[in-house]
Image (cartoon, rainbow, N blue to C red):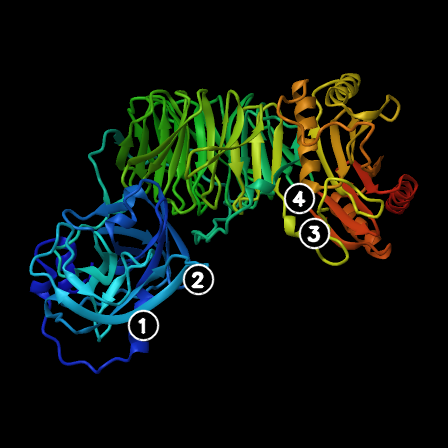
Amino acid sequence: MNLSPKLSAIIAGTATVAALVQTQPALAQKSEVDICEIAEAITVRIDGPGAGGSGFIVDREGDTYTVLTNWHVVDREGYYTVKTADGEEHRVNYNQIEEQSGVDLAALSFTSSESYPVAELGNSNDVTPRQTVYVSGWLNPLPAIPEVSYQCLDGNITSILSQPDDLGYSLIHNASGNYKGMSGGPVLDEEGRVVGINGQAAVDSITGPVGLFLAIPINTNAFKKPAPPLSQRRPPSQARLLPPAPSQAPPSSETPPPSLAPRPVLPSIPRIPYDNLEFANTLRGDRNSVALSLDGNIVATGDTVVQIWNRRTRNLIQTIKGDRDRVLSVAISPDGNTLASSSNFGEIEVWNLKTEEKIHTLKLSGGNAVSLTISPDGQTLASSSGNGFELWNLGTGERLHAIAGLPGVILSLAFSPDGTTLAGGSADKTIRLWQVENGELIDVLSKHSGQVRSVAFSTDGLTLVSGSDDGTIKIWNPQTGGLVNTINLGWRVDSVAISPDGQIIASGGDRGSRLWNLQTGNLFRNLDEQSGSVAFSRDGRTLIVGGRTIQIWRVLDRSSLPQSSQGQPQTPASATLTATARPALIWTFRASTMRINTCLDRADRAMQQEGLTKLKKNREALYVSGIIDSYAIDISCGEEEWMVAVAGADRDTARQWRDRFLHAMEQGSSPGSQRPYAPTNSSTNAAHPALRWTRRESGMRVDACLDKAFRIMQEQGFENIKKDGDDPYVSGVIDNHTADIICGSQELWVVVTGSERNATGQWRNKLRDAMLR
């Protein structure tokens, strides 16, 4: 790398900085404003398991930046974020931090394609008492300053210790720079050069702080950089590399190769509110293997045939039979145009989904393909079979590399986000990392005690997770090979995925699907008791869970939920509903796995167990309804699916009631947890809303249905109209009524709630008739 002699010495550790500072000509005096602008540009905020602190950028190599800070800022295990001057946050985990021996210093690195300035280092041997210095850092909140704030404070060097203390501190200053959060920030001289690292306050054992602060001179012996990137580490290969083989089925002149997407630029994913994740709908297809396109709109499922679904409309787009009697694995290219599927014939078939033509038939060298995955740029296909794996050019069908002779079968494959590394989970209880360019082994991770069934990278490539037969999910730093955390489930883990924002791990296993907090390892949410594969869309707002059925979960946008005419969210202050309040409306569909009579009986029993009143079971209209407190609950039973609808005073409480009845319908009994509210008794004066709904067969396409529903609500004077093409439905409010029109591939539903039954029924009929005209 091209570094100055001074910085090369720091990184190489061959000499002190002071010994290599070259004589420079006199520089023009900089103003305080100039120096603080320099300081702010190089200073970063560091947050993590501790109280937070500061640091500064000391080196850049390509897209990798090195930050210097105090060790006491980053000495706790866990994940950290480095916030640069432009407001961008860059994630770092504990294994990417290098403690500097004998001093209170640490170096950490982050990657970014942005261009950030690097600190110019001065010579702390030239610092003298009474010299002006500037301390830069991010101050933690104080009573008078309620948020983290950047500070650039001036002061003077008051004295210099003849010998540094045990942690390397020797510069004493009065720049008031050691309030909490300022530790690790740079100390700059009058030319804007870093001469020290701020870090401690001088404290008298009797009187307390004395208004003086300490810094470590920048000429302290050279520091060690964090571990190099994964691509630079090369342990000896432990597998046999086979030579490339020619394609077994070159593309014909009539069939164009699949379109190859350019190598993606990894986006910065905003934090996603997974508290708002809700079940959307179900696909009833073959489900031995499931794959999701990056945009979340195309779902491929495989069992005896491959089926391609439109996730938004739930329509089956096409069925691919091919030359097979069982589909073992499917993969979709990032652009959604190419599909690869493996069979029990020892072959991979590659299809162009736009033309529905087969492009290649690839003959495997090791038997049937257990796992398939396509690189982020859409150019490379990886397949595992036998005790090895193969890499293919997806456009030409050429085999690029073949690895054989591994100790165990590779059960799962995953590309790193930049496409340079391939991870494989193995039956020999290990995870192996290979360089995609040449097939060379990089590292072997071996902390599992059972077969590793699934591996997945985070979007930034800094985290790898694995699921195993040993009942654990392990979180790794793929850059160093270090184990960061272990989540103990106690049952087999078949599939894992990381949300694009890096918050959540989704898992599927023999006891159902779960969401986990990636940083803490704590359970975030139970999704369903069915087991199977899990996959996130690129924007993180869609989650696919495969199992007995294929479930689609969506993160709802709470900011666009129906609001009052004053623009405030409709959340009553109390748990009761007045005659003029607009009720909240919550509904969810589930694919039906029981007979209609069983569904009705189960709904009736669940409502009795929960203490609902005014129970009504209608075997002709196929629903059960009841009232509890200020909430009306209906359960509708159909041949293909059933629905739970709840209307009431408060949206969150309505959602809790919805979830209780979903559990009761799926498990056959009510959950044992405490009810959202106690059952209504004769002394309760709370009003309950009217809940009226109807379903009708529809010959419209889903998108046409949504457009029509939106137009009708506009014509009828509804406010806060929302069209959601994902679930899909249109909602709106008028007076004290909330209405949803739900568009399915074969049916449409109109659901209306309000404070008065007759008016609610009239709105239901009016919207229904308008939709059917």
Image depth: mark 2 or mark 4 in front: 2
Instruction: Name the spot of residue 23 as percent of width and height, x first.
Output: 9, 74
Q: Are marks 2 and 1 in contact (CB under 8 Å)?
A: no
Q: Secondary structure at mark 4?
A: loop
Foreground pick, 344 / 19: 19
Q: Residues within 10 Å of mark 4 (few under 14, many from 20)?
A: many
Instruction: Specify the label residue 36 is tagged with.
Output: 1
Q: Are marks 2 and 4 in contact (CB under 8 Å)?
A: no
Q: Which residue is mark 4?
A: 726
- The mark nearer the N terminus, 2 or 1, is 1
Image depth: mark 2 or mark 1 in front: 2
Q: Secondary structure at mark 1?
A: helix
Q: Which residue is mark 3?
A: 569
- The mark nearer the N terminus, 4 or 1, is 1
Foreground pick, 447 / 401: 447
Instruction: Name the residue rendered at 46%, 42% in the picture.
Output: 503
Instruction: Name the spot of residue 358 as percent of width and height, x first.
Output: 54, 36
Instruction: Name the residue rendered at 36%, 38% in the picture.
Output: 422
Instruction: Name the spot of residue 70 as percent of width and height, x first.
Output: 25, 53
